[in-house]
Image (cartoon, grey):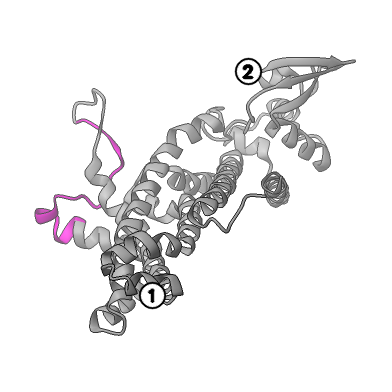
Amino acid sequence: MYGLFTLFGVVTVIFLLFSVLPGDPARMMMGQREDSEQLKSIRKKYGFDQPKTTQYLYYLNDLSPISFHSKNKDSYTNLATNKYEYSKLFRIGEVIVVLKFPHLRDSFQKNGKSVSQVLSETLPNTAILAIASIVIAISIGIILGIFSALFKDTWFDRFISIVSTLGMSVPSFFSAILVAWFFGFVLHEFTGLEMTGSLYEVDDFGEGQYIQLKNLVLPAFVLGIRPLAVIIQLMRTSLLEVLNQDYVRTAKAKGLSTYRVIKSHALKNALNPVITAVSGWFASMLAGAVFVEYIFNWNGLGKEIVNALNTLDLPIIMGSVLVIATLFILINILVDVLYSWLDPRVRLQ
C-alpha cells in the first residue's frame, strides 16, 4: 500500500511538472506543419482542449488497470479513440468499466508510436547494462571489503580506502569520457574495445542484427564504479562491527579458522547494509545510466530520455520516469523480503 501511495505521488508530481511547461503539445506532435483544423482535431483527440484537472483525471484513467470509458464518440475516454486491448468488466449507465494494461499514451515525435513499445525496445538494454554493472560492483566490492576489514589499518586498507573514495567522488559522465578514450582509443589495439557501441549492431551488409557483448564491458564498468566504491566501504565497516560481536569471538575461541568464521557466521549478518545499498543503486542505475548510455551510444532507456528531452517528447519522458519509479518501488519491496531471510530478527508485518 505504501508503494501504491508513493507511485500515486510520483504520477501526480510528473503530471503537474510537465503540465506547466510552455508550449502546445498538439503543435509538438505536428512539427513544422501548420493546419488549424488538424491542430483542433489533435487537441480534441488527446484531451488537450480540456481543463488541467480533467486532463489529470484522463491521465490517471489511462494509467489505471481498471478504467472508465464513455460511449460518447467525442469523448477522449471513448474506447474506439484510444485503441488499446481491454477486457470489459461491467457497464454503469453510459460508462463502461474495463480491465487493461496501463496505457502510457503515444509518442509526440515517433509517428504515433506507443510509449510502451518504445520502452519495450530500450528498457531491456538498460536492464542488461544495470545488471552487469551491479554484478561487477557486488562481486569485486564484497571481496575487497572483506580483505580491507581483515587487513585493517595496513597499507592495503588505506589504498582501497583512497581508491573507493575517488570512485565515489568522480562523476559518471567524466568517468565515461575518460574510460572510453583510454580503453577504447589509446589502448584499442590491446583491448579490442570500441569507444561507442550498443548491445545489438547491424552487420556490414545490413542483413540483420547480432549481439556484440564486448560493447557491454566499458559502460558496465563505468556505471559500476560508484556502487563498487560504496559497497567496499559498507562491507568493510559492517564486517568489522560484526567481527567484534560476542558470538564471533566465541567461534574463534572454539578454534574455527578465519575463513570459516567469516563464511559461516559473520558474512551473512554483515550483508544487510550492503543489500540496502545494492537495492538503491540498482534502481538508481536505471535513471543514472542516462549520461553513460549517451556517451557510449548505448541504445537504452537513458539515451532515449535524452533524445526525448531534446525533442520535448513528453509522453516518453513521463512514461520513462514512471517505469523507473515503479521498478524502484518493486526493488525496495524485494529488499524488505530479503531482510527477513538475512536477519531472523526482522519479520515481515
Q: Which residue appears at 51% of the width and 57% of the height? A: 343
**x and y percent of residue 51 in the render?**
83, 39
Would you name the residue on which mark 1 appears?
249
Q: Which mark is residue 167?
A: none
State whether residue 278 is above or below residue 7. Answer: below
The image quadrant of residue 112 is top right
Judge the density around disc 1: few (<14), some (14-19), many (≥20) Cα neighbours within 10 Å.
Answer: few
Tell me which segment is drawn in magenta.
184-203
User: Is residue 187 located in the magenta-colored stretch of the structure?
Assistant: yes
Disc 2 marks a residue whose amino acid type is Glu
Which quarter of the figure is the N terminus placed in? Answer: top right
Q: Which of 245 and 329 is in front in this view?
A: 245
Q: Which residue appears at 57% of the width and 51% of the height? A: 336
**x and y percent of residue 54 in the render?**
82, 37
Badge nearest the viewer, 2 or 1: 1
Task: State whether residue 236 appears in this view.
Answer: no
**x and y percent of residue 72 in the render?**
83, 17
Would you name the residue on which mark 2 appears?
85
State whether residue 206 is above or below residue 158. Answer: above
Total labels drawn? 2
Q: What element carries label 2?
A: loop
Q: Which residue appears at 37% of the width and 42% of the height? A: 128
Point out the tag, 2 or 1, that comes first from the N-terminus: 2
Q: Nearer the viewer, residue 319 or 73?
A: 319
Disc 1 marks a residue whose amino acid type is Arg
- Would residue 113 be found to the left or right of residue 300 on screen? right
